[in-house]
C-alpha cells in the first residue's frame, strides 16, 4: 500500500484543500486503481479545485478540457493541420514524390495538432487530466470519451491507434445540468461533493485566508451557512464565501453586525442574481448576521 | 465496536461482497459483475479491517449517481449491521377499484355533476380547436357509433383506448422533438465545407480539391418532461393520462415523467415497461395509494430543486397535466413556475377541465400559473389532445 487515504487527506489539507472522507477515499482509490473519478455537486463547492490541488500535490501538469455544447472530437482530441497539409500537397506537386509518399508525409505526426485529450495521454509523467463540466458537452462527445477513459488509447484512422505513454489521472466534474450516461458513470469512481459543513468551511477559510480574525471567520461561516438555507436561486459556493471574506476583511470589518449598509453592499460577492439580491433585503441580512 | 452480520461466516470476502452487491442491486443501484470486481480491487487498496474505510471505498465504487450516493450509507449499515431496513417494495397492495367515485374537490363543488352522465356537458366547448364540425361530442350525440376520440377520458378504460391514448401521445412527442443542432456533421449538402474530407480526397488529384464535401447541422430533438397530477380530483383521468405519459416516454430514452399528488415520484423507468396495461396498472396502484390532496406548487418546487437541473434546459418542453386545484397558496405555483421558466424551457399545461363547458381558469392555482404558460390547452378527450399537434410543432 503506497499511501493510505488518510495521509492523502492530510496532504491535501496541507496544500490548502479540505476534502471530506468520501472525497479523500475516492481520490485515493482513483490514484491506486488508475481509474477516472467523476465528481458531481452544485457549482462552487470546489470540484475543479480538487484537480488543481492534486496536480500541485503530485507536482505534475494539469491538462484541462473545458467542455461546452458543440465540443467535438476535433477540438478535444486531435485535428490535422489542414492549411499546412494543403501547402505541402501543393509543394509536392512540383517535386517528384509519389502519391503514397505525399500521403505518408502529410498524415504524419508533424501535421497533427494535439488537443487536450491526446496531449494528456502522450506525456512521460502522468498528468492530471481535468475534464470540466462534462455535462455541458453533448452526449456524442461522452461516447468519444469512453474509449479514452477505459483503455487510455486514441484511434486516429490515418495514423493508427495511439496508446497512452502514461496513464493520466482523470477527474471529471459535472454540475448535473444534464444526466450523464450510465456507460460513462460505470467507467468512473464517483463522489458527490456537497457544500461543506460549518467546521469544514471554517477550516477552509482559515487555510485560504490565514490572516483573518478567528471571531470574524466564525461569523462569516455562520452567515454563509445560514444564507444557504434561505430560498435562493444560486446558493453561494465556497469560492464566493472566500471572495466575501476577503472583501469583508479588506474593509476592516471586525463584527458583521457593525455596519448594516456596508454589509448589505458587500453581499454582491455572495448573491449573483437579481432575484436573490431582492430576496435578501437588509432586514434578512441583519437577522442572519444577528444570529451568528 | 459494531459487529458485522456474519461473524462466523467463513465464505471469504468475495462471497460476502457479492451478497452486499445483490442487496444494493435489489435497492435499485445498477451494478454488474464489473463493479463487483472493481469493489474487490478497491478493497485491496485499503485497510479492510476498518469498516469505515470499507464503507467509503464501496461508496466511491458503487454509488454512480447522486441519488444512490445519498442513500448508500443507510444501505451499507442495513446490510452489514443488520439494522433492519428491508428492500423497499414498489407496488402498493390493496387498491380498490371502488375508488372510481373518489371525491373531486373542485369538480364536485363547481360543476355539481354526478359520477355518471357528465360527459354531455363536459365536452362541447372546444371552439378553439377548429373542428366545429364535430360539435356536440360525447354521450349526447345520438349515435350508435361510439366515437372513442370524443368521449370524455373518464370513460376510457379499455385496453384499446389506453393504447390509442398512447399512440396520440407518441405522435405529439414526435412533432415536438423536431429541432436542429448547432453541431455539424458531414453531409452531401450543407452550408460549410468539410475541410478534413476535402483535403483527404484532394490527395488523389494532386492537391486539387475536386470533390467538395460539406457539413450540415443535424436534428437535435427536444426533450420532453411530463408531470402528471394523480391527486383525488384527477383520479378519474389517471389511467388514460398514464397511458398518455407512457406514449410520451416509451419511444425514446430521454423523456422524463413524474407523478405528483402530495409528493413527487419519478416514474420514467416504470413507464418503459413493455406491457402497457401492466405498467399503467402498476402506476395506477402507486397513484391511488396516495390519493387525497394536491400540492402542485410544492411539487413543482421540489421538481425545481431536485430534478430540473438535469432534465430541463432550453431545449425542453415541460408538460403539466393537472386540473389546477391546489391546496397550497397560489403564490407557490407562480413562484415555482417562474423559476422553472428561467431554465428557458417551454411550459405546456394540459387541463382536462378546460374542455368543459364554461370553464374559466378560476381555480386560484390555475390563474396564478397562466402568465408562465406557453400553451394552455384542454385535455379531456383524445381528440383535444390530437389537435395540439400543430401548436406543439410551432412551440
Image: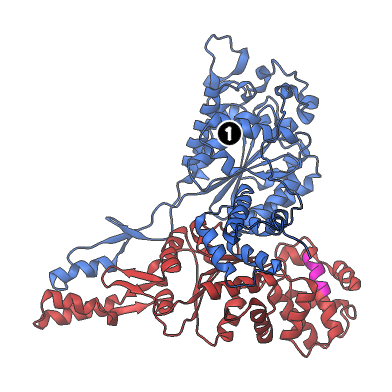
Chain colours: A red, B blue
Q: Magenta stretch: residue A2 in it? A: no
**Main SS type for the magenta part?**
helix
Residue stretch rendered in magenta on the structure: A222-228
Q: Magenta stretch: residue A227 in it? A: yes
Question: In the image, is residue B295 above or below residue A104?
Answer: above
Question: In the image, is residue B24 above or below residue B391?
Answer: below
Residue drawn at 52 percent across, 23 percent down: B160
Instruction: Quadrant for residue A102, please give it.
Output: bottom left
Q: Residue furthest bottom?
A: A211
User: Could you tell me which quadrant the C terminus of chain A lies in?
Assistant: bottom right
Q: Position of residue B325 (x, y in %)?
A: 75, 36
Residue that carries the numbered disc 1 in the rendered image: B279
Assign a secondary structure to mark 1: helix
Give the letter of the chain under mark 1. B
Residue drawn at 22 percent across, 63 percent down: B212
Q: Is residue B343 visible?
A: no
Pick whichever, B251 or B86, lies toward us. Answer: B86
Q: Is residue B121 visible?
A: yes
Q: Position of residue B103 (x, y in %)?
A: 78, 26
User: Could you tell me which quadrant the N terminus of chain A lies in?
Assistant: bottom right
Pick whichever, A207 or A236, lies toward us. Answer: A207
Pick whichever, A171 or A81, lies toward us. Answer: A171
Amino acid at each position: 500500500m503506497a499511501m493510505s487515504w488518510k495521509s492523502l487527506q492530510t496532504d491535501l489539507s496541507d496544500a490548502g484543500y479540505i476534502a471530506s472522507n468520501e472525497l479523500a477515499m475516492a481520490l485515493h482509490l482513483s490514484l491506486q486503481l488508475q481509474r477516472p473519478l467523476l465528481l458531481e455537486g452544485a457549482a462552487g463547492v470546489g470540484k475543479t479545485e480538487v484537480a488543481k490541488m492534486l496536480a500541485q500535490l503530485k507536482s505534475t501538469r494539469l491538462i484541462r478540457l473545458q467542455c461546452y455544447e458543440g465540443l467535438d472530437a476535433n477540438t478535444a482530441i486531435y485535428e490535422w493541420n489542414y492549411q499546412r497539409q494543403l501547402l505541402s500537397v501543393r509543394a509536392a506537386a512540383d517535386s517528384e514524390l509519389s502519391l503514397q509518399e505525399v500521403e505518408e508525409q502529410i498524415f504524419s505526426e508533424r501535421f497533427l495538432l494535439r488537443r487536450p485529450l491526446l496531449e494528456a495521454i502522450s506525456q512521460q509523467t502522468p498528468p492530471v487530466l481535468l475534464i470540466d463540466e462534462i455535462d455541458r458537452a453533448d452526449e456524442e462527445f461522452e461516447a468519444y470519451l469512453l474509449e479514452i477513459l477505459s483503455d487510455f488509447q486514441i484511434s486516429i484512422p490515418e495514423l493508427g491507434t495511439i496508446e497512452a505513454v502514461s496513464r493520466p489521472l482523470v477527474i471529471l466534474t459535472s454540475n448535473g445540468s444534464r444526466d450523464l450516461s450510465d456507460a460513462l458513470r460505470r467507467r468512473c469512481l464517483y463522489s458527490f461533493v456537497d457544500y461543506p459543513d460549518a467546521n469544514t468551511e471554517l477550516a477552509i477559510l482559515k487555510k485560504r485566508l490565514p490572516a483573518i480574525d478567528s471571531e470574524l471567520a466564525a461569523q462569516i461561516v455562520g452567515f454563509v451557512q445560514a444564507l444557504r438555507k434561505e430560498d435562493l436561486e444560486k446558493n453561494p459556493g465556497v469560492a464566493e464565501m472566500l471572495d466575501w471574506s476577503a472583501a469583508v476583511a479588506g474593509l476592516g470589518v471586525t463584527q458583521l453586525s457593525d455596519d448594516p449598509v456596508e454589509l448589505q453592499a458587500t453581499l454582491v460577492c455572495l448573491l449573483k442574481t437579481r432575484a436573490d439580491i431582492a430576496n435578501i433585503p437588509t432586514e434578512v441580512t441583519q437577522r442572519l448576521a444577528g444570529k451568528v | 465496536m459494531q459487529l458485522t452480520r456474519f461473524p462466523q461466516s467463513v465464505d471469504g470476502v468475495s462471497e460476502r461482497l457479492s451478497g452486499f452487491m445483490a442487496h444494493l442491486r435489489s435497492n435499485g443501484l445498477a451494478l454488474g459483475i464489473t463493479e463487483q470486481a472493481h469493489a474487490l480491487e478497491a478493497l485491496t487498496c485499503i485497510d479492510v479491517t476498518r469498516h469505515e474505510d470499507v464503507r467509503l471505498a464501496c461508496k466511491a465504487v458503487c454509488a454512480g449517481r447522486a441519488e444512490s450516493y445519498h442513500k448508500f450509507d443507510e444501505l451499507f449499515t442495513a446490510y452489514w449491521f443488520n439494522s433492519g431496513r428491508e428492500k423497499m417494495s414498489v407496488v402498493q397492495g390493496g387498491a380498490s377499484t371502488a375508488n372510481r367515485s373518489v371525491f373531486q374537490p373542485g369538480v364536485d363543488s363547481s360543476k355539481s355533476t354526478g359520477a355518471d352522465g357528465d360527459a354531455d356537458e363536459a365536452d362541447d366547448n372546444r371552439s378553439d380547436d377548429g373542428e366545429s364540425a364535430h360539435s356536440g361530442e360525447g354521450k349526447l350525440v345520438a349515435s350508435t357509433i361510439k366515437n372513442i376520440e370524443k368521449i370524455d377520458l373518464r370513460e376510457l378504460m379499455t385496453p384499446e383506448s389506453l393504447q390509442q391514448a398512447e399512440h396520440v401521445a407518441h405522435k405529439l412527442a414526435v412533432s415536438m422533438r423536431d429541432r436542429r443542432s448547432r453541431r455539424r456533421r458531414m453531409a452531401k449538402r450543407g452550408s460549410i465545407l468539410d475541410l478534413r474530407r476535402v483535403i483527404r480526397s484532394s490527395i488523389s488529384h494532386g492537391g486539387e480539391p475536386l470533390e467538395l464535401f460539406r457539413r450540415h447541422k443535424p436534428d437535435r430533438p427536444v426533450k420532453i418532461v411530463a408531470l402528471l397530477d394523480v391527486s383525488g380530483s384527477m383520479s378519474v383521468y389517471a389511467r388514460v393520462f398514464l397511458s398518455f405519459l407512457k406514449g410520451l416516454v416509451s419511444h425514446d430514452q430521454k423523456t422524463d415523467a413524474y407523478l405528483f399528488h402530495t409528493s413527487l415520484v419519478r416514474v420514467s423507468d416504470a413507464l418503459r415497461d413493455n406491457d402497457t396495461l401492466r405498467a399503467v396498472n402498476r402506476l395506477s396502484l402507486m397513484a391511488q395509494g396516495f390519493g387525497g390532496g394536491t400540492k402542485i406548487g410544492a411539487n413543482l418546487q421540489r421538481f425545481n430543486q431536485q430534478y430540473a437541473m438535469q432534465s430541463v434546459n432550453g431545449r425542453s418542453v415541460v408538460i403539466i397535466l393537472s386540473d389546477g386545484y391546489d391546496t397550497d397558496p397560489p403564490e407557490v405555483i407562480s413562484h415555482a413556475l417562474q423559476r422553472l421558466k428561467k431554465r428557458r424551457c417551454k411550459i405546456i399545461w394540459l387541463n382536462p377541465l378546460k374542455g368543459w363547458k364554461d370553464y374559466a381558469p378560476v381555480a386560484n392555482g390555475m390563474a396564478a400559473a397562466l402568465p408562465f404558460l406557453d400553451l394552455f390547452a384542454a385535455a379531456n378527450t383524445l381528440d383535444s389532445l390530437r389537435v395540439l399537434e400543430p401548436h406543439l410543432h410551432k412551440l
